[in-house]
Structures are given as C-alpha cells and as structure tokens.
C-alpha cells in the first residue's frame, strides 16, 4: 500500500469532482439546513434525513466511473493497486464527504440562527443558551446512530463497485430482503428467549428472569450487526475491485 | 515485457474467441495488430493490460500476471482506448490530475505534441471539443507519459487528414530502443510507413507475428501487368494500375511492405504463413 498513490487518486478525484461536490452537495445541504431553520426553528429532522441520504448515496457517485465502459477502463488502468483505490474511496466516503456535509449543515444552522435573531431583534449569540442547548439535545443524539451510518455507507460502497447499473436501487432491494431475514432472526431470538424462560415463570408464578435467559436481540445485534457489516462490506469491496474487468 | 501464453478467452462459454494465443512483444518495435472486425483485437489488448482475465493460459507483464494490476505494471503501460474517456476538465487540469501517475511524464513534450496538432489552448475544456480534437489531446497525453509500452486502439479513427500526417511524423520520431508501441487498427493505410512488426489475428489464433524486414525477406510485394511466373504466388488483386501481388521472395529482392496485401495474403494462406514465419 503506497500512500503517495492514494494521495494521487484523491487529488485526481478532487480535480474532477470538487465543483459538483461544492455546488450540488455542500451548498444545497447548507441551503436546506438554513431554510429548515427559518421555516421551523430548531426542528432538524428533515435536514438530517437529507444529510443521511446524501452521505449514503455518495459512494454511487464515487464509483460512477465503474458504470461506463470507457471510464471504467480509465479508472482500472490508473497506476495504483486495487487496495489503494478502495482505501482512497473509503477516505472520501467516510471522512471527506461526511465532514463536508456536516460542516454545511452546521454553517446552514448557524446562518439560519443568525437570520432568526436579526429578524426577532435578538442579540446574535452563537454560543448562547438556545443554540448550545439545541446542539446538545437535538443534534448530539444523532451521533448514537453513527455506527448505523457507517454500516450503510459500507453497504452502498460495496454495491457501487459490485453492480454495474443502478447500484442504489439494487442495494435497496437487497437491503429489503436482508432486513426481512434479519427481522426473522431477531424475531427468532426473542421467541427463543421467551420460550426458554416461560416454563420457569409459569412454575414460579412470576416474571423474574431465569438462568436460561440469553439476552434480547436488540441488546447486542444493534452493535454487532453494523460492526460486522462494515468489515464485511469493505473486505468484499476490495475483492470485488480485484475481480472487476472492463 | 508482455507475453501471452496459450491464452484462451470467450465472452460466451460455448464459443471461444481465442484458442491458445501465444504472443510476445519485444522492446524497440512499433507493432501493428491487424485483424478483421470482431476478430478480438480490442479484447486481446484488454487481456494484455489486465482489464480482462484469460480463462486459460497466462498474460504476463514483466513476468507477473497482468490481472494483478500492480501499480508498477500499470505505470509502465498507457492504453489509449478507441472510445476515449473525457472528463469535464481543462487540458491543463487533466494534465495536473493524471500526469503524476506516470513518473516519466514530460510537460514539455505534452505541450509540443499539442502544438503540433494545433491544440495548444491549455485552458479549453476537453469535453467541449469535437471528437477529433479530444482524440488529439489524448494522443498527446499518451505520448508524453513516455511509458515503456504504449498501446493505441484505432488511434487514427476520427482524425482529419492533416492530423494523420502529423501523427505519423510524431510516431516516427517517438519510437526508440526502450519503448514498445502497439497499434491496433484496421486502417492500415494510415500506418503503413510506421509499423516495423506485424501481428495478425484470425479465428482465435495469432497467425502471423514477424518483424517487417523478415516479412519482406520472405515475401515480395509487387505490382505487375501479369501474374508472377517465378516463385509461389500467395495473393493477387487486379486493379486499373496493374496486378498487385504477394509472391515468394525467391531472389530476396527488396520491396515495400504493403500491410493490406499482407493481411489478405495471410488470411488466405494461414497454414503456410504460420509455418513460414515460425
């Protein structure tokens, strides 16, 4: 793995895409955050949904070169290993783009807050009580879903390399099927859990948990599944990149 | 440098496009890869560069399997595709973005080639140019990479007549002992004077692979009023100017290699030519 090659790939990406990223993504996201703040102050659900969508969709754009024959050949023949191409993509999807979107949202919210204060003839206090509380209570809780976000990016990352056409919709379809299977597993674990605890409860006439209890699915699956998915999808992305032909 | 050993490949499992292709490219030559439409010229180039994987046999770059696509292998090769990839970048930006991948890239040469082809506005967006102009930019870039192996697929397609002449002039000066150039084309007239080694692929096999001087030592390319009397006649073509013919060069007379006649003679005498140029 040569860091110089990764830097060259990232640099080439910026030459080709920085305008699209800034104009069609970061500025649009900033505008959405700003208008959301003006229309319904401190209600940022829509903003976060839009940000989540853009971030998860991003790998499709990142690997759009693999979806056309001429650009696929050009990309595969760039002098860097398959691993370096995957790592450069991981950096762009997991660091650069998330930071760009996050910064756009923050700037949009701050601008919106500033405009609101001016309109209400209030003192603009960026570190003031309202805004501080808002960030603490409304934005930080989204951080709990960061693992899910990264897992979603990794899945889309793999789909963007794996599918030659319409990776987003194909991943949605696959995700739906996988969700059904996972749902069935979670349901099965819960059912098994109840089935194993039920005889003791009936016997004792109360609902105290017994030694046979194996833990409810949502305790561990919510951490294990995304973590395993991230490792799995990036490993598969590398293998798929290695096998990609033009 | 590049070696194909018994390569087999087919897009359809039941129909092989290549059935045991063997081929080796030596440094310092300008190869012409000729073949009919659909013979698999582009596919063969993709296999050589690791873009397609052989189903049997081996494609090697510097002794390593081509499908590994290592950074070293890829920085030794530049493949100018027929369907060129053109990003929304100015010429200058394209150079800044992609030249760093090629350690021997020369900015001076790039500018020189662009100027020769009248494409010296470095601030023009490449995707706004006409097809021929896009091709000129990509040819200039490909040549300026100074890679040991330059592969060009139908490079003269879309070029106007003056540019074809300029291209020939540049290519004649480009080749040296360290560089290998491989040009795949069906427009043989455009590259007549350039090519010094010829490879012909037909029906999934490399039926001829020989340097130009070896070919002209064994074959005589001639135009005459009547068909050859001495030596074996491999191919003839009647035209208003006389009878163009490819004959056995019994007396080792010098003649100018005619790629079109050679191609037609080769596909008509596959077995004999395979033996003749073994």
Image: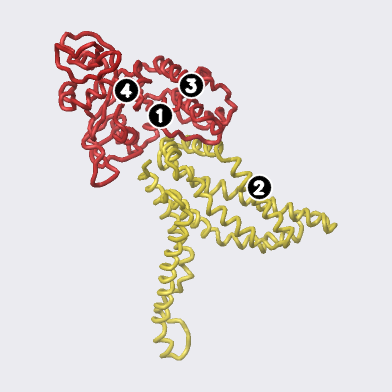
Chain colours: A yellow, B red
- Considering depth in this image, is B147 or A191 the residue closer to the camera? B147
Instruction: Kindly identify the residue that appears in the image at 44 percent across and 53 percent down.
Output: A159
Please rate how many residues cluster around mark 2, counting C-alpha atoms within 10 Å: few if below 14, some from 14 to 19, many from 20.
some
Q: CA distance from mark 1 to mark 4?
A: 15 Å
Which residue is tagged 3? Answer: B106
Judging by the rendered image, the residue that carries numbered circle 1 is B78
Graded by Cα atoms within 10 Å as few (under 14), some (14 to 19) or many (20 or more), the crowding at tag 1 reads many
- Decide which of tag 4 and tag 3 comes sooner along the chain: 4
Above/below status of B278 relative to A73: above
- Which chain hosts label 3? B
Q: Residue at x 18, y 23 (%)?
A: B273
Residue labelled with disc 2: A27
Would you say A99 lies left or right of B275 here?
right
Instruction: Identify residue for label 4.
Output: B31
Q: Are marks 1 and 3 on the same chain?
A: yes
Give the secondary structure at mark 2. Answer: helix
Q: Residue at x 26, y 40 (%)?
A: B9
In space, the residues marked 3 and 2 are separated at their CA atoms by 38 Å
- Counting residues from the start of the chain, the first of labels 1 and 3 encountered is 1
Give the residue furthest to the right: A121
């Amino acid at each position: 793995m040569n860091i110089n090659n990764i830097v060259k790939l990232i640099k080439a990406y910026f030459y080709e895409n920085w305008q699209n990223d800034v104009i069609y993504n970061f500025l649009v996201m900033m505008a959405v955050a700003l208008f959301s703040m003006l229309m319904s102050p401190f209600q940022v659900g829509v903003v976060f949904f839009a940000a989540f969508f853009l971030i998860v969709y991003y790998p499709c754009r990142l690997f759009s070169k693999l979806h056309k024959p001429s650009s696929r050949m050009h990309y595969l023949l760039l002098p860097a290993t398959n691993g370096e191409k995957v790592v450069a993509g991981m950096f762009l999807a997991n660091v650069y783009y998330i930071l760009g979107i996050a910064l756009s949202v923050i700037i949009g919210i701050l601008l919106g807050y500033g405009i609101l204060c001016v309109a209400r003839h209030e003192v603009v206090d960026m570190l003031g009580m309202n805004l501080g509380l808002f960030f603490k209570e409304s934005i930080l809780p989204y951080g709990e879903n960061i693992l899910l976000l990264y897992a979603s990016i990794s899945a889309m990352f793999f789909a963007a390399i794996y599918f030659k056409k319409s990776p987003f919709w194909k991943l949605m379809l696959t995700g739906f099927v996988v969700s059904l299977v996972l749902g069935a597993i979670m349901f099965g674990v819960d059912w098994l859990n109840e089935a194993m605890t039920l005889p003791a409860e009936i016997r004792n006439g109360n609902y105290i948990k017994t030694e046979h209890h194996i833990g409810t699915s949502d305790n561990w699956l919510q951490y294990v599944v995304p973590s395993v998915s991230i490792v799995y999808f990036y490993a598969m992305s590398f293998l798929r990149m290695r096998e990609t032909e033009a | 440098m590049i070696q194909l050993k018994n390569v087999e490949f087919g897009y359809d499992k039941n129909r092989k496009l290549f059935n045991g292709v063997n081929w080796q490219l030596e440094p310092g030559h300008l190869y012409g890869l000729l073949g009919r439409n659909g013979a698999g010229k582009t596919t063969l180039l993709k296999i050589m560069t690791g873009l397609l994987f052989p189903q049997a046999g081996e494609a090697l770059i510097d002794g390593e399997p081509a499908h590994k696509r290592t950074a070293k292998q890829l920085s030794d090769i530049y493949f100018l595709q027929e369907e060129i990839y053109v990003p929304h970048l100015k010429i200058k930006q394209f150079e800044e973005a992609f030249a760093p991948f090629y350690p021997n890239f020369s900015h001076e040469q790039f500018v020189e080639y662009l100027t020769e082809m009248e494409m010296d506005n470095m601030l023009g967006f490449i995707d706004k140019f006409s097809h021929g102009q896009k091709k000129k930019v990509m040819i200039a870039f490909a040549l300026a990479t100074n890679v040991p192996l330059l592969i060009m697929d139908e490079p003269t397609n879309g070029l106007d007549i003056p540019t074809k002449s300029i291209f020939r002039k540049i290519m004649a000066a480009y080749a040296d002992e360290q560089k290998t150039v491989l040009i795949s084309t069906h427009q043989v007239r455009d590259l007549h004077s350039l090519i010094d080694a010829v490879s012909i692929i037909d029906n999934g096999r490399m039926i001829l692979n020989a340097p130009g001087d070896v070919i002209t030592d064994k074959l005589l390319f001639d135009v005459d009023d009547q068909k050859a009397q001495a030596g074996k006649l491999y191919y003839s073509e009647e035209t208003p100017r006389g009878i163009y013919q490819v004959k056995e060069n019994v007396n080792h007379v010098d003649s100018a290699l005619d790629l079109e006649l050679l191609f037609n003679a080769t596909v008509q005498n596959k077995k004999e030519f395979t033996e003749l140029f073994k």
